[in-house]
Image (cartoon, rainbow, N blue to C red):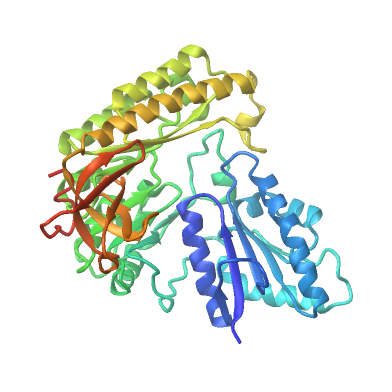
């Protein structure tokens, strides 16, 4: 009988990818994924340390899981409870201290050792000593382990593919270098082999993932005579775009300091590379950017936006913003508002600064009062909403090519993404799931487009984005 596995995933796309890899690693042990933790034989919380109060949310979930685990043990069974991801990496010992019923704590670069950890936890559970038996593995390997496990296939027309791990930037507010380790890029041949497999399994779109994905510097395939020894992300996407059956390429998340000309050219010259870029800026103030250790100025960011739109006028830019960083004055905040107005973002995420233990920003003076941070965040979000609404309004009456990848909220409706990453809803038969179809936009909103299926077949990639 198959054992039941439930994974709760917090945070970013990298965690979504990592959760899928953990399920792959556990499949040979007889674990099959289920949708709830009730009666599961193993529960994994794959955590993220980026958002505010991340650790407390994990402990809250652990508290809810404890009765389920204890009930199963009273009935003679067992539930293996594991905490994975960035909170596990940063606070592994604290997790075992506060929640000694947790069986396994593992960092983001030790997923391939899960079978070994399960065996160790089982041995510990069968011993006479029942308290403090949790297995912890948060060591950084010399090189991150990327397992390519082709058997399970993909679950939809869009698939994630991890190409890069870690970050060397050490932004003062960020825990990623401490929880994910130093930058490491997969060899290009390995990435391309996995991409071919994903397409063979039904993926039409591949999203290349990394903590700092545009810093990719993977070893070139050895068979390429005269080729550069190391490929950047632009060259990697050029090669991936040649895979038969692959219609769309995206990548996330990027750092402005690593946005080179080869990557900008890829957006202009490779049709499969979508006209959308998530490029976090965090602030429009040079003094705040310096305090964040972001390694660029607001005008540097504007120049990148100008370069992109020079080669691709319809380029959609998305970003992240932090308001209320220590020392941020009203003038600094207004510089952020000015940047939003100048660039015109299609999407953006914005957050109040919240100190992460162990990061330099947590110890900085001139912390901003919570009520002031909340007021600035509301003002920024209102401006971002206007920017998003204006971008989407440009598509009213236009035709967009939509990759339908999920059911809509209404009966007989499908939803998907345009080349510009807009959510699009349309009445459509189930036979169009996984297909790219033309949608004539009838209504636009801040966060989505709604339309009807057009009379003409859709192109395979970018064409038809705003016909």
Left or right of 175: which side holds 280? left
Residue 195, x across and y down, in percent:
32, 67
Q: Residue furthest front?
A: 411
Q: Is residue 26 above or below residue 185?
A: below
Identify the residue at image location x=46%, y=49%. Answer: 211
Residue 55, x across and y down, in percent:
67, 46
- Residue 35 is at least partly visible in this image: yes
Residue 121, x across and y down, in percent:
73, 73
Identify the residue at image location x=36%, y=25%. Answer: 340
Q: Residue furthest right?
A: 128
Q: Residue furthest left?
A: 456
Figure disc tally: 0
* Quadrant in the rendering for residue 437: bottom left
Q: Residue furthest top?
A: 331
Residue 210, x across and y down, in percent:
42, 52
* Quadrant in the rendering for residue 62: bottom right
* Quadrant in the rendering for residue 235: bottom left
- Residue 367 is at least partly visible in this image: no
Left or right of 423: which side holds 63? right
Q: Is residue 386 above or below residue 6?
A: above
The C terminus, quarter of image: top left
Left or right of 177: which side holds 192? left
């Amino acid at each position: 009988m198959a054992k039941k596995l439930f994974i709760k995933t917090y945070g970013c796309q990298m965690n979504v990818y990592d959760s899928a890899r953990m399920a792959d690693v556990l499949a040979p042990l007889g674990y099959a994924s289920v949708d709830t933790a009730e009666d599961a034989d193993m529960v994994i919380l794959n955590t993220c340390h980026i958002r505010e109060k991340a650790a407390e949310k994990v402990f809250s979930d652990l508290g809810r899981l404890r009765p389920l685990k204890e009930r199963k043990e009273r009935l003679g069974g067992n539930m293996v409870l594991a905490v994975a991801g960035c909170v596990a990496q940063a606070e592994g010992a604290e997790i075992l201290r506060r929640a000694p019923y947790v069986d396994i704590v593992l960092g983001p670069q030790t997923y391939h050792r899960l079978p070994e950890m399960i065996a160790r936890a089982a041995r510990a559970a069968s011993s006479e000593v029942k308290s403090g038996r949790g297995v912890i593995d948060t060591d950084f390997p010399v090189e991150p382990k990327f397992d390519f496990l082709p058997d399970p296939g993909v679950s939809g027309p869009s698939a994630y593919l991890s190409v890069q791990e870690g970050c060397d930037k050490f932004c003062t507010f960020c825990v990623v270098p401490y929880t994910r380790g130093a930058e490491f890029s997969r060899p290009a041949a390995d990435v391309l082999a996995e991409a071919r497999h994903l397409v063979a399994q039904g993926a039409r779109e591949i999203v290349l993932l990394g903590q700092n994905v545009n810093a990719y510097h993977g070893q070139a395939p050895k068979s390429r005579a005269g080729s550069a020894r190391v490929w950047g992300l632009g060259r990697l996407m050029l090669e991936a775009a040649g895979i038969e059956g692959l219609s769309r390429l995206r990548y996330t998340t990027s750092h402005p300091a690593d946005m080179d000309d080869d990557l900008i050219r890829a957006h202009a010259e490779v049709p499969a590379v979508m006209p959308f870029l998530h490029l976090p800026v965090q602030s429009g103030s040079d003094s705040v950017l310096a305090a964040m250790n972001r390694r660029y100025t607001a005008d540097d960011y504007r120049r990148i936006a100008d370069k992109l739109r020079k080669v691709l006028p319809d380029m959609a830019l998305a970003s992240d913003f932090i308001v209320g960083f220590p020392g941020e004055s009203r003038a600094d905040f207004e510089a952020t508002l000015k940047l939003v107005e100048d660039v015109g973002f299609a999407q953006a995420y914005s957050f109040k600064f919240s100190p992460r233990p162990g990061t330099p920003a947590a110890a900085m003076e001139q912390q901003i009062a919570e009520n002031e941070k909340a007021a600035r965040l509301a003002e920024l979000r209102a401006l971002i909403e206007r920017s998003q609404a204006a971008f989407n309004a440009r598509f009213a009456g236009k035709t967009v090519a939509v990759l339908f990848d999920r059911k809509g909220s209404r009966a007989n409706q499908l939803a998907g993404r345009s080349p510009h990453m807009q959510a699009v809803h349309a009445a459509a038969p189930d036979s169009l799931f996984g297909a790219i179809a033309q949608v004539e936009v009838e209504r636009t909103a801040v966060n989505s487009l709604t339309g009807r299926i057009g009379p003409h077949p859709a192109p395979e990639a970018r064409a038809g984005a705003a016909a």
